[in-house]
Amino acid sequence: MLPLLWLSRRGPRDLAPWLAAAADAAGLVLLLQFAPRVFAGEVIAWRMDWVASLGLALSFRLDGLAFLFALLILLIGLLVILYARYYLSEESRLDRFFFLLMLFTGAMLGIVLSGNLLLMFVFWELTSISSFLLIGYKSGKTEAREGARVALAVTGGGGLALLAGVLLLGHVAGSFELDAVLASGEAVKQSALYLPILALVLAGAFTKSAQFPFHFWLPGAMAAPTPVSAYLHSATMVKAGVFLLARLYPVLAGPDAWFFTLTAVGVVTLTFGAYQAIFRHDLKSLLAYSTVSHLGLITLLLGIGTPLGAVAALFHVINHATFKASLFMAAGIIDHETGTRDMRRINGLWRYMPYTGLLAAVAAAAMAGVPLVNGFLSKELFFGEALMLERGGGLQWILPLIAVLGGVFSVAYSLRFIHDVFFLDRPLDVERTPHEPPVWMRIPVEVLVAACLLVGVLPSFTVQPLLEASAAATVGGPAPEFSLRLWHGVNVPLVMSAIALGGGVLLYFLLQYGLDLHTHVQSRNTAKRLFDRTIVALSTAAARLTQRAYAGGLTSGVLALILAASFAGLFPFLRGKGAIGSLATAPVEPMALVVFALMCVSALGSVFVHRQRLIAVIVVSVVGLTVALAFVYFSAPDLALTQISVEVVTILLLLLALYYLPQEAPPERAVNRALRDFFLGCLAGGGVGWLTWAMLTRPHDSISGYFIANSVPQGGGTNVVNVILVDFRGFDTYGEITVIGIAALGIAAMLGGVKLPWRQADEAGRSWAPEAAHLPLALLVRLLLPLALLVSAFLFLRGHNDPGGGFIAGLVTAVALILLYLGAGLEWTRQRLAVNYRAVAAAGLLIAGATGLIAMLGFDLPFLTSAHGYVHWPVVGKVPLASAMGFDLGVYLTVVGAVMLALTRLGEAGLPFSAKRPEA
Amino acid sequence: MNQWIIAPVLLPAVVAGGLMLAGSVVTLRVQRVLGLLATAVLLAIALVLLDQAAGGSQGVYTLGHWRPPFGIALVLDRLSAVMLALTAALALCALVAAVAGGVDAQGRYFHALFQFQLMGLNGAFLTGDLFNLFVFFEVLLIASYCLLLTGSTPARLRAGLHYVVVNLVGSSLFLIAVGLLYAMTGTLNLADLAHKVPLLAAEDRLLVESAALLLLTVFGLKAALFPLLLWLPSAYSAAAAPVAALFAIMTKVGIYSIVRVYVTVFGPAAGEAAPGLGDWVVPAGLITVVWGALGALASRRLGSMAAHLTLMSAGTILSVAALTTGPAVSAALYYLLHSTLATALLFLVCGAVAERRGALGDRLQRAGAAQPVPLGIAFLLSVMLVVGIPPLSGFLGKAMLLQGSAAAPQAVAIWAVLLASSFVALIALARAGMTLFWAVRAAPAPPSRAGEMAAPMLLLAGMLALTVAAEPVKRFMDATAAQLGDVRSYSEAVLNAPGRP
Amino acid sequence: MELLVAIGIGTLTAAGVYLLLRERTFSVLLGLTLLSYAVNLFVFATGRLQVGAAPRIQPGVETYADPLAQALVLTAIVISFAMTAFTVVLAIAARHRLDDDRASPSAEQDDA
């Protein structure tokens, strides 16, 4: 159905409405087929599993209550479709409108026909969404957007509460299937979760049905096109809430909480809504408040908790739907014909549209509770129930009074609607001359009004079986005895009706002529304003919080991390125990003490001079040197070599960076910031130092024993560290060279995208030389290069057995090449050494991968499986060779390529354009 | 030897290496074809692996043919297979979006970097060795730095600096934690750690607990757990939309690491050495959710709103997963799948919207250009998915989370926060949607560009599948959670894998 | 001896952290460098400290320094180096695009 409508977008204008009408009618026919079985008391079900883990199944269930609502939805839907076809203006996109309308209808039917509570919730939210889209249909208008937004917020929020309630309910009942839930009524009412469930479900129901204090979205929703208001916001969607209450009646109704909450809310809503309605100037707004009031009435009836009350509630559902829908349609007709809905401007329309006026009058009479129309009957039932109420802790006498008061108000506003619009003898303030609407627009109204009359005059023939079936389904047992006759004799309810009628008429005319209603300034929608203000306050608070948090930028991020880490790392020790181990410590040698002192002094020194950047770099390099010395001292020659070579390149990098950055930084002003950071530094340093100390005083037993034992026999090398790197844990190294490669790539990408300025001199006036000036240095480096390369090769080849290896060799080569650039000049070197370093690095990565792949593809062994043996070279003799050397070659190339790429690009980046090499 | 297991790491590595080697010798067009092809093949491989893992036993790949714990092992179980498949699927969609939107031309070597990123992600998900996890974390981090900085625009440079420095500090912390664990247990292999940690003497356990908490901090940084979330909004909103979409999986790496390391090494068997994951992570996760929701509400730019919603979903997953019961973990996993795709979709849609608005970009101000209808529908659907409105997978996921956490002591707090934050997100997104799509200059809606909707359609299709096939997926996640908790079978599989000697 | 090492590592960390929290990017870089030295020493120390042990397998020698810890440190040194290089270039690029070399340059007006 829905896809068809989408396709109809390009078709003739009328296609969409006809499709919609056809679908609706088909549904209606289908429904009516089940009527006899439903009336006999049977429950028809259909089920398909969807997400069994959740308890969510596609199950549908048709009983009396569902039937009643489904009938309402489909019947009134059909009429609304017809009405809308003629109401909507020429430019509107009909297909989009009917698509949304059908979507809504489907969702609404889903709610009433669901046999699974979770599924019902799914449809519940779908109605909120489609209602949102329909209210905002004329999205260009501000009030449409406003109304849609508020509606979505309130019904969406209520929906979330309902979800929680449904989940809890399912938990208590053991299943979400309605049959199971309805059967577990006693269990639910006894359970400790009863109150939370009730509160949450009521939140959902009250938001949907616009009960006080959640009523404020409904008047705003009147910005929707009138057919939407007629359908959704009078007859169907807002009824979903009371439907839910009726559906869950056997499970939730009875206890005091139910009784008092519902009656209280119902009473307040009933009177508040009715009172407000009298003073509205907008036709639809009046009807909206009236809807609120009538829904309050239904809520009240359900709250009372007697079976007859349920019957009355359901009866009023039907009646209200029929007369309210027709009134909305009438209002739409008036709007369509006069161009306005403001009752202050529309007066005396009887002259122009008497027939419409007659229809409206009948419907309004139903709204007021005038005899001979259906509204009267349900009002009578209401009055009767109000009188017979026994519960209420002594306050039950209030109810009949409120009932009458409500009646008075409803008469007053009904009269206002008719009298003010059609009969009031004031000037007519509209642009065009109104006349009767096209026939097809009137027909739906006629049908509905006819229904009002019919039910009002002959209730037992028309509506009795339906009410019996639905009431039985609601109450969960046989239907109570009741008789719907027009005349029960002169009893108190009749008297109450009479009082209401009289009082209402009196009130209206008093207000209209005494106080001059037209000049009444409309009270603003306080509840809505409260809601809006809350949202705005929340937004502003949120904004302020986040702005403050993000204002610190990088530093606050690091700060948070350091704090969290310090806390995390030290937390276990807060509980007391020292955790220092018992291992004896080694003695201190004087040399070590000196190096240690140098390290600490330089580290602290760097803190003090960090603003004089050149000096700071030198101081940091001293620290690095001491670290390398520490490595030597503690028997880690590979590490020392690596540390020194990395150190050299890093310092070179930092110095190069100083070309582009200011060499001195201004002092920072905040003293307490420095103090805070000092404290943090001590905390972090102390923490790490503590952990180190705790760790070092414990004995150590690790898997390295295996590596030591197997390095020669299995790995083919005596330098265990290197064997671990390229063989045992070669995958780590593979990842590591990938990191190097990516870094180089990223550096190249960044420098390709940023134009760096060419500096001739730094701040102190010392000039930067783009070319080498110092001849001896140039000569020296040119001689040094082959030597350095030889050293690299040596380091590379011996790496497997002695300190050395791919990394170190690569770094040595890189340093040598850099010295060449530095000494001999960029231009000279570039002319002779036109190497695409990026390609070199990539080749390194691929070679490393290839050596690993050989084992995979050739021998079906895992990646990076190595082999080793001996090779006989003519002069040298037997040379041990391991396949891991190929891997090491890859490492070597990657390191050389990456480091050279980074440094040369950085060096070139600041040169004027002509000196730059075209990017490769 | 099941060579398939290492394919997700090797394939992107080789392709990336090749692309890096060729540089601009190959045209952008060829690079695109290669990149898309490689990613598609990766997805196929991931699905094959998923099928293998569904059999129920762990596949172990011993690199270098050295027996664990001496060699590095890659472990393919249900969880890692799921993460691999998710990454591949997401990557394909993101790459399609990048190509369609021309993002890959904004910066150099985009396709190579993209493949490297995938290599890092896959390696992290597969590895069974803690130090190897560190290495692959570094790989995926540096690739992400480069991808974030694509085009080197000022906003990206600024956000990038923050992101990079914070993560570098995090890496140092990672090293300290790993070092500490090695010092106390003498091993780096996860299964072996699981064996050795319970055997420690009482006074040694304190240090291990310290290391565990440090690891939590590091992984929490990646997962943007409070208070380590300050870097995310600026980074994700500055990134190009397809890159941000791919980054949806990055927080999940942190979540995965927390779950994997904690359940395996610091589970109930570890006794006193294990800090209670729930005590720390659940409150932090809930605060993250609240922060994300408030941040979304306060956002004046669409990208920032999407980033805060990412925060919300990451916090949601963690709060429930940290309960470590079977139903909770399985619900969290389903929601992880869903939210990754949903967040990616949101970023892509936001990117498309922002592009059409020209100078206004993604600022939430009125009177922008009108948007094409399919884009509006996509936006509506992404709102429904992210907030959790029925009937789509977002709702199913939320319902599962609520049910899964119902038995926990923190259930009330979790429920309240999850529902309230959904409400706030709904308001924020509805407001944004109305500003972008409804309060526009009156103009006929422009037609949608070719290819603009391709990646979003793919993502939507994926989530539709998640919705319809929710039951099988959930059951798979139940099995995954069960397998994850079965540490004994994990260690047995790993420590008995074939290898030398 | 061990105490000395612990104090040394602690001092390096403290200095590094202090510099990390400074306003200027360059100071942050220096801090990162110091921090990485500290962490490398830490990881090295996890293998426990052996003074003057043999650098490679020799017949007859029983005790060696922990090679695994050394391998880990080597990897860590190289990775940190790559990261440092990258960050230095990033800092330079940021400084020149944003015209501001503070670690947290002021954000645009409408960042949220």
Image (cartoon, grey):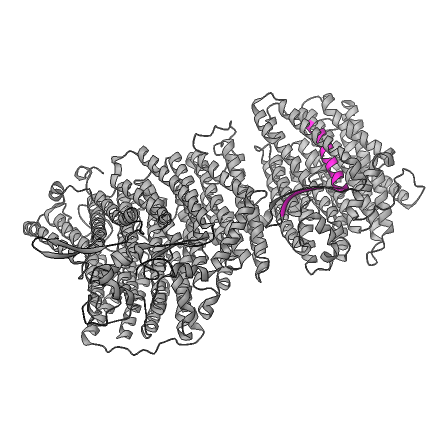
Is A413 colored magenta in this rendering? no
Residue A855 position within the rendered picture, expressed as x and y whole percent measured from the top left = 28, 50
The quadrant of the picture occupied by the C terminus of chain A is top left
Q: Tell me if residue A517 comes above or below residue A739 in the rendering.
A: above
Residue B180 position within the rendered picture, expressed as x and y whole percent measured from the top left = 35, 66
A806 relative position to B449: left or right: left
B481 relative position to A804: left or right: right
The quadrant of the picture occupied by the N terminus of chain A is top right
Give the quadrant of residue A346.
Answer: top right
Q: Tell me if residue A531 comes above or below residue B96 in the rendering.
A: below
Query: Which contiguous range is marked in magenta?
Result: A56-81
Residue A648 position within the rendered picture, expressed as x and y whole percent measured from the top left = 19, 57
A715 relative position to A158: left or right: left
Residue at 71% x, 29% y is: A25
Residue at 38% x, 42% y is: B42
Q: Nearer the viewer, residue A35 or A229?
A: A35
Q: Is residue B127 visible?
A: yes
Is A65 colored magenta in this rendering? yes
Give the quadrant of residue B356.
Answer: top left
Q: Nearer the viewer, residue B325 or B426?
A: B325
Residue A540 position within the rendered picture, expressed as x and y whole percent measured from the top left = 52, 50
Q: Is residue B429 visible?
A: no
Residue extending farthest to the right is A489
Q: Nearer the viewer, residue A203 or A492?
A: A203
Callout count: 0
The overriding secondary structure of the stretch rendered in magenta is helix
A851 relative position to B482: left or right: left
Q: Nearer the viewer, residue A828 or A525?
A: A828
